[in-house]
Image (cartoon, rainbow, N blue to C red):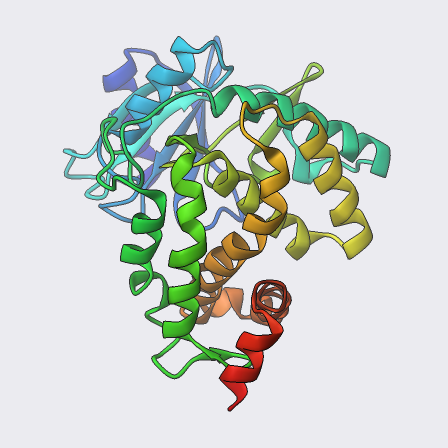
Amino acid sequence: MNNTAVIQKTFETQMDIKTCSVCEFENVPNNRVFKVETESQAYIFKIYAKRDWPEDGKLPYIARKLEEYGIPHARLFVFERDDRHFPNGYLIEDCLPGTTADRLALSVEETVTLFETLAQLISKVHQIPVMNYGYIGSGTADWRTFSGFVDDMFDDCTTNLGKKFTIGALPLHEIRRMLHAKLKDCDGFPPVICHGDLSTKNILVRAGEVVLIDWDDAQSLCWAADIARLTLWMKLTYDKQAADTYRKAFLACYETPYDKSNFDELENYLHVWYGLDYLNFALATPNYHYQTEAIETILAQALACIVSPQSQMEQGE
């Protein structure tokens, strides 16, 4: 039985709905994603490439919380990891009508509106509390502090960089020390659901509203961490003027009871953290090698903002 036939049979067994067609989406990284058409609507059938990601229990938990807080999302019908045909697991969810923003030819003004609308949506997502920081699982994470989570994950997120890897004059152990010291400021922000991969490929535009899709990378973090990942993606995607324009538009419309002015400083530290993680991933994946130069440039810029002249002098001795 070929892969399409297995998907068709699995879908019909799980959903008790007859399929009309099954076709695979092209250019999807990591996992394999299929569109299943029935007479009444379309569904997503996603086959996972890794057994441990997303972690068990997370996506059903996220779906329940989004429903509870009235946040539009694709309904999740099945998340299964006990099927011999799909040893790493699969899910079935709604295939929502609309177009992802990365496929739209938007003007600068339209893109500004997109990020303003996204900011209003993310403000609501960040109202959903989670117990502790880190990987969510079925609703409770393991780290009591955000800074502790970053520090404990540092080695895992820099394994491909090597012990002698440096940006400028700073070795990894010094970068780690600086991140842990400064990101303690984030410990005062409560853990909330964070999408974890905010970019136009995960923003579905439909009928004047935006919907976030693909929650595989969701984690329990602080609000600033989620936004910093978005602004780093902006730097990797747009020229400086455009990135600054879209960042400003997003932050102006993002609502939080906490002091947003502190984000300007925290952002550079978080960009170092995410930049190292992205670079670590890129070095292990040939298809992503083209990104390494841009990531290294952003890392150097972020580090230049957080290292004092005195520290730079000491590192140069």
* Identity of the residue drawn at 63% across and 47% down: 264
Number of marks in the rendered image: 0
Q: Is residue 140 visible?
A: yes
Residue 190: name its quadrant: top left
Q: Residue at x 36, y 79 (%)?
A: 162
Figure quadrant of residue 152: bottom left
Which residue is situated farthest in the bottom direction here? 317
Image position of 248 with respect to 150: above or below: above
Residue in the foreground of this view, choosing between 45 and 255: 255
Is 84 placed above or below 168 here? above
Q: Is residue 177 left or right of residue 282?
A: left
Q: Is residue 297 or residue 198 the one in the foreground? A: 297
Q: In the picture shown, does residue 292 fall above or below 260?
A: below
Horizontal side of 20 relative to 64 (left or right) equals: right
Q: Nearer the viewer, residue 292 or 260?
A: 260
Instruction: Name the spot of residue 43 as percent of width and height, x first.
Output: 44, 21
Identify which residue is drawn at 43% across, 80% down.
Answer: 165
Quadrant of the rendering where the N terminus is positioned = top left
On the question of residue 197 being in view, the answer is no
Q: Position of residue 237 (x, y in %)?
A: 68, 53
Residue 92 percent across, percent down from the top left:
35, 25
Give the residue at x 34% y 80%: 163
Left/right of residue 71 with respect to residue 296 in the rendered view: left
| Depth order, front residue of 303/274 | 303
Residue 143: % across, % down: 25, 42
